[in-house]
Image (cartoon, rainbow, N blue to C red):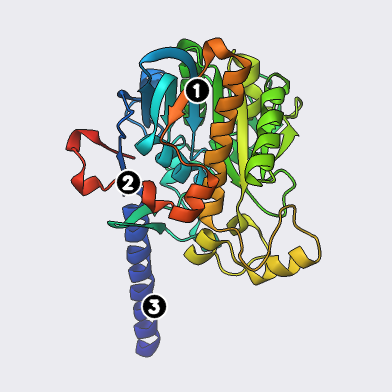
Amino acid sequence: MAREWRIKFILIIVIVLIMIISGTQLYNHRHYNMPVVAGPGVTKVINLSEYSKGLKGTMGDTNVFFLQGKEEGGKMLILANTHSNEPAALLAALIVLENAIVDKGTLIIIPHFNNSAGRNTRPGDGYPLYFEIPTAWGSKKFRMGNRDASPLDQWPDPDVYIHYPDRQLLSYIDARNTNRTWPGRLSGPLMERVTYGAMQIMREEKVDMAIDAHGAETMFPVTNCIVAPEKSMRIATMASLTVKAREGLDNHVEPSPSGFRGLSHREIGDYSDTMPFLLEAPLPFLDQPTGPKTVGLLLDGKDPFLLSLSKKKKLFVPYDETGWPMEKRVGQHCSVILELVRQFSRKFPDKAIKLQNVPRYAEVVKNGIGYYYQYPAEADKKDIYYN
């Protein structure tokens, strides 16, 4: 009898230790703040809660960076980390944020749009907690987030999520997915308040175009593409054709479905004058039939199972032994963003937006992502912001 109690006691101690260790890791991940260096073009930084009061003091609040040119022109909003397990969007947005100079017009960037999801993770699926990008000054450490906001910040989930205002029935988990809660509302759940804040930026600042950057599975047909509603289709098509002709990027166009509500590329256009575009870059890490979800897979996109499926023509993107490295994904986002700006400016010269010092695909692939990040330790403290 005494022996059985000793075994039970030892097991209890082991379980408690496991809980303490894992709990500490998740706590540290949630509270790890990533430094962002405001580049030379940044003219103002505010909180999203200034446009959605219900976000103040919550994990839904996040930094909004303004880059205003000396000459009047159009206005563009870039959203990244809508889904925080699709990090190429964040990496591309930070390249623009830390380097871009705006000669004409205004650029607004929200690099950590779903801040709560960026502090959430999926240990049950084997997601790494962090990943690092090499730079000339060392490595830049990033949290690996999740698709949905943390239940610590928005709970409980409903049995069915009823989309506002169309009342379409969606999955319960979509209540924490900021690409299902557009256009949002001031009095709604936290993620609806997040999307409402972005909508208010577009309405109050009279934003002309909005780009929501993402990543998608290689086995999913809506990947390697620009998703656009009717009002944005011409510019999206011209951008797609141009990057393919000039840079060899096979980036097709997908129409935004009018019957599926809550999506940024649908609701932004329907509830504001802004022209929305959603970018999808291939992300092998998200595919189900892969090996372990390692940092290596996240960064280089190499997987033997996907290679086998590619040979059987089961993927929707080109795929070979080189995988889909992060540099290609980030570079693609940069090129497509710049081309959308160019095509918009050609179509509406009175609202032209002119940027400089933002690299295109070939430059990012050649130089690496970290080449474009500033060293926080050498930056002026007033230029460092945390998310």
Query: Would you say the residues marked 2 and 1 are in contact, meaning their CB atoms lie under 8 Å apart?
Result: no
Residue 76 badge: 1
Instruction: Give the distance between the C-alpha atoms of the residues marked 3 and 2, in whole angstroms.
Output: 37 Å
Disc 3 packing (10 Å; few <14; some 14–19; many ≥20):
few
Front one among 228 and 252? 252
> Between residues 241 and 386, which one lies in front from this camera angle?
241
Is 342 left, or right, of 21 in this rendering? Answer: right
Using a 10 Å C-alpha cutoff, classify the residue at mark 1 as few (fewer than 14 neighbours), some (14 to 19) or many (20 or more).
many
Image location (x, y in percent) of residue 166: 68, 20
Query: Considering only vertical position in the picture, is 325 above or below 79?
Result: below
Q: Amino acid at mark 3?
A: Leu
What residue does disc 2 label? 34
Whether residue 178 is visible: no
Q: Position of residue 302 (x, y in %)?
A: 59, 66
Give the residue at x 42% y 31%. 356
Indicate whether 351 appears above or below 174. Answer: above
> What amino acid is at disc 1?
Met
Kind of element beneath mark 1: strand
Q: Residue furthest right?
A: 312
Foreground residue among 99 and 219: 99
Looking at the image, residue 77 lies above or below residue 158: above
Q: Quadrant of residue 102?
A: top left
Q: Residue at x 59, y 12 (%)?
A: 273
Residue 188 location in percent, x, y? 51, 23
Count residues near mark 2 (Cα–Cα under 10 Å), then give few for <14, some for 14-19, many for 20+: some
Q: Earlier in the sequence, mark 3 or mark 2?
A: 3
Residue matched to label 3: 11
Residue in front for this viewpoint, 140 or 259: 140
Residue 305 seen: yes
Q: How far separated are the C-alphas under marks 2 and 1? A: 24 Å
